[in-house]
Image (cartoon, rainbow, N blue to C red):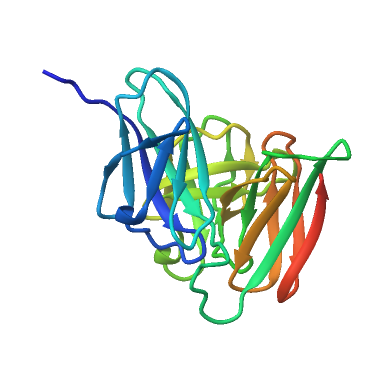
């Protein structure tokens, strides 16, 4: 009898619209070799029976940039991952868009492969509604305007808090309580903002290419250096350099 273990469940979305991408159009390679994960009709991919240790999955889809996902397979552990595919020049854009070409520098050199989290201008936000969220917290009381359907849940959020900024994955909403996939690393006070965030990886030249539906301020966060801040985007094409 062959036993099957799900090492990772990936929810693949269109990074511009937030909608699920049909898994039938996704081509995958694992550690450089073609791979056929189990495909779910809601855009999900399931990786099973991986060898213990680190793995790199690359997802390709027409109209999008290739997306690399790194994970660590371990006995009895199932990773729940949310993957946003970034539009390429062949994406069927409708209407005007705002582009960002961001060159990431570290010690005056292009930071190839560096991970950065970005939040789209005008993305729906929510706030911490409790007096204090301590490190290790698994539930957050939240306040938002409008309906909860505007929030991309389950999904990853940038919890903006200066030097204590971090990424929190909200797995579900129970009324006004957000249930987290993993405990908070840092503590945060009432009123701190959370924005839906997407993970970007700088290419070999240290450049990140991002497309947004509107102009405006973009929040960024680099988990390796802890640096966070805002970049103001005008309509059309924007080129910026960020020193980490």
> Which residue is located at x 74 percent, y 45 percent?
206
Front-lying residue, 129 or 36:
36
Q: Quarter holding the N terminus? A: top left
Q: Residue 236 at what x, y percent from top left?
A: 71, 75
Residue placed furthest toward the front:
33
Q: Give the answer, above or below, for where 26 lies relative to 218.
A: above
Residue placed furthest toward the right:
108
Residue placed furthest toward the bottom:
95
> Which residue is located at x 37 percent, y 58 percent?
21
Q: Residue 78 at what x, y percent from top left?
A: 35, 29
Q: Give the answer, above or below, for where 136 lies relative to 181.
A: above
Q: Residue 50 at what x, y percent from top left?
A: 35, 24
Residue 107 falls left or right of residue 76: right
Q: Is residue 172 visible?
A: no
> Which residue is located at x 15 percent, y 20 percent?
2
Q: How many marks?
A: 0
Q: Residue 107 at what x, y percent from top left?
A: 87, 35
Residue 95 falls left or right of residue 172: right
């Amino acid at each position: 009898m062959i036993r099957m273990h799900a090492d990772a469940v990936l929810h693949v979305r269109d990074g511009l619209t937030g909608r699920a991408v049909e898994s039938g159009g996704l081509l995958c390679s694992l550690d450089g070799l073609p791979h056929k994960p189990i495909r779910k009709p809601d855009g999900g991919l399931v990786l099973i029976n991986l060898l213990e240790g680190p793995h790199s999955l690359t997802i390709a889809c027409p109209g999008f940039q290739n997306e690399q996902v790194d994970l660590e397979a371990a006995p009895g552990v199932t990773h729940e991952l949310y993957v946003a595919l970034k539009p390429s020049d062949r994406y069927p854009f409708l209407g005007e868009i705002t582009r960002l070409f961001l060159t990431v520098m570290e010690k005056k050199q292009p930071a190839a492969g560096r991970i950065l989290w970005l939040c789209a201008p005008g993305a729906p936000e929510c706030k911490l509604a409790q007096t204090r969220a301590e490190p290790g917290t698994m539930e957050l009381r939240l306040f938002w305007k409008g309906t909860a359907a505007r929030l991309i849940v389950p999904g990853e959020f940038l919890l903006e808090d200066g030097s204590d900024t971090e990424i929190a994955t909200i797995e579900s909403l129970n009324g006004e309580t957000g249930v987290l996939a993993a405990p908070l690393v840092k503590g945060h006070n009432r009123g701190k903002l959370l924005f839906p965030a997407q993970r970007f990886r700088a290419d070999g030249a240290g450049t990140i290419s991002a497309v947004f539906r509107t102009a405006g301020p973009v929040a960024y966060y680099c988990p390796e250096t802890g640096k966070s801040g805002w970049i103001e985007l005008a309509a059309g094409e924007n080129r910026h350099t960020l020193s980490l």
